[in-house]
Image (cartoon, grey):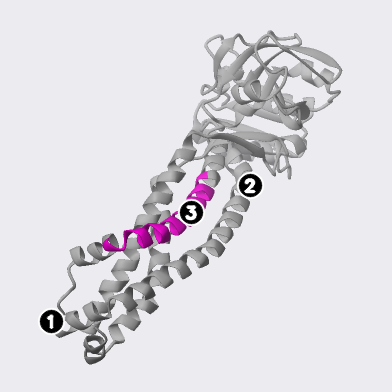
Amino acid sequence: MKAVPLSYIARNLWVRRVTTLLTAGGMALVIYVFATVLMMSEGIRRTLVDTGQADNVIVLRKGAGAEINSGVGRGAAAIVESLPGIATDAEGRALFSKEPVVLNNLPKRGSGKPSNVTVRGTSELALQLRPKVKMLEGRMFRPGSSEIVTGRAIAEGFQGAGLGETLRFAGRDWLVVGVFDAGRSGFDSEIWGDSEQMMQAFRREAFSTLVFRLQDASQFEAVKAAIEADPRLQLEAKPEIRFYAEQSEALATFISILGTSLSVIFSIGAIVGAMITMFAAVASRIGEIGTLRALGFRRGAVLVAFLLEAMLLSLVGGLIGLAGAAFMQAVNISTTNFQTFAELAFQFQLTPAIAVKTLVFALFMGFVGGFIPAWRAARLKIVDCLRAA
C-alpha cells in the first residue's frame, strides 16, 4: 500500500496553523497538568527517599507507622545499643542516636499562618549519621544546651527560625545557632536540638526512634532478627532508606491518583477539540481526498494520513505542555505529609520516565480524537469527493 508522504501531513497542519495552535494549546494545558502532577508525586518520593541513608538502620515500636507514633524506652534503647555490628567513629563512639521526634506549631514568614514542623532531638553524631547534611551557616548545637539548628526550608519559611533568631516552644527559648542544607531531603524541613534537652522540654519518657549505622550492611537481617525476636523490646528494625520511602507512599499516591483523574477529565475536552479540528480538516479537503484516491492511494493510506496528522497535532501540544511543566522544577513548594502531619518542602522532579509517559498520553489523545474523522475520510467515495470539489 502506497503511503501518503509525511511532508504532506505536516504541510496541512502548517496551512491551518491558527487552528493547529489553538487545538495544540488546549492539549498543552492538559499535558501541563498531567506532567506537573507526576512531577509533584516524584518530587515528594525523591525528597523522602533521599532522606534515608542506605547503611543506616532505624528502629521503631512495632506497628508504628511514623516516628511521631513510636516510643522506645531507655531500657530497650540500651539493649539495642549493646548489639554487635554497630559501626563506630574515629574516636571509638558508636554511631548510634536516640531520637525523640515531636511536632511543633510555628508561624510562617509573611503570612503568620501556623503550620506543623518536625522537631528532632539528636546528638553531636547526627552529621556523621547523615552525611548528606551540611552546615550552611553557623555551627552545630552544643550538647546539653538550649541551642538548635534548623533546616534550610525551615529557616527560610518560618518566623524566628533563621540564624541568630530565637524560637519559643515547649516552655523554653531556643537559640538558632546554625542552618543546615540536607540536599533537598526531608531533613530540610526539620529542627534539630540536643536529644536529652528535647526529652526534658517536651516531658517525654521515651525516645521516638533509634538510628544507627552498621559496620556491614549485609548484617542487617541478623540484627533485625535479634531485635524482633527479643520479647523485652517489642520493636522493629528497617533500613532507613526504606522507611522514608514508605513515608512518601500515601501522599505521593494520593496526588498521583487525584491529578491523573483530573487530567483524564480535562483530556476529554482536548480530545473533542482535536476531533472537531480534524472533522473540519476533512470537510475542507474533500477534493484533496478524492485526488489522493484517484492517484492510487488506498483507503488505508488516507486513514493513516489523517490519523498521523491528528497525532502530530497532539505531539506538538504535548511538547509545549511538557516544556511548560519543565519550568516547575525551579519552584520550591511545601505540603503536609499525611504520615507525619508535618510540613514537607520539596521540588518538582522531571524524569525521563515522566517525559515518556506524558508524550504517550498526548499521542493517545491525538489517536482517540483523530480516529473517527480519519475513518470518515477513508470511507469517502472517489466520485463523491471529485463531484464536491
Label 2, label 3: how far apart the Cα atoms are? 24 Å
Which comes sooner in the sequence, label 1 or label 2? 2
* Mark 3 element type: helix
**Considering the image in quadrants, where does the C terminus appear?**
bottom left
Left/right of residue 383 with respect to residue 339 in the rendered view: left
Q: Which quarter of the image is occupied by the N terminus? A: bottom left
Q: Nearer the viewer, mark 1 or mark 2?
A: 1
Q: Is residue 31 left or right of residue 145?
A: left
Q: Is residue 168 left or right of residue 91?
A: right
Q: Answer yes or no: is residue 82 visible.
A: no
Which region of the structure is painted magenta? 15-39
Task: Kindly identify the amino acid type of the residue bearing the numbered disc 2.
Answer: Leu
Q: In the picture shown, does residue 372 fall above or below 180?
A: below
Say which residue appears at 20% left-offset and 66% top-offset. Answer: 8
Neighbourhood count class around disc 3 (C-alpha, 10 Å): few under 14, some 14–19, many 20 upward: many
Residue under the image location 48 percent in, 33 percent down: 330
Residue 297 position, x and y percent, is 17, 81
In 3D space, how far apart are the residues under numbered discs 1 and 2 (Cα atoms)? 58 Å
Residue 267, labelled with which disc?
A: none
Q: Amino acid at mark 1?
A: Leu
Say whether residue 170 is magenta.
no
Is residue 18 part of the magenta span, yes or no?
Answer: yes
**Circle on res. 29:** 3
Three-letter code, disc 3: Leu
Residue identified by numbered label 1: 295
- Which comes sooner in the sequence, label 2 or label 3? 3
Q: Earlier in the sequence, mark 1 or mark 3?
A: 3
- Residue 260: horizontal and vertical position, in percent? 55, 58
Residue 251 disc label: 2
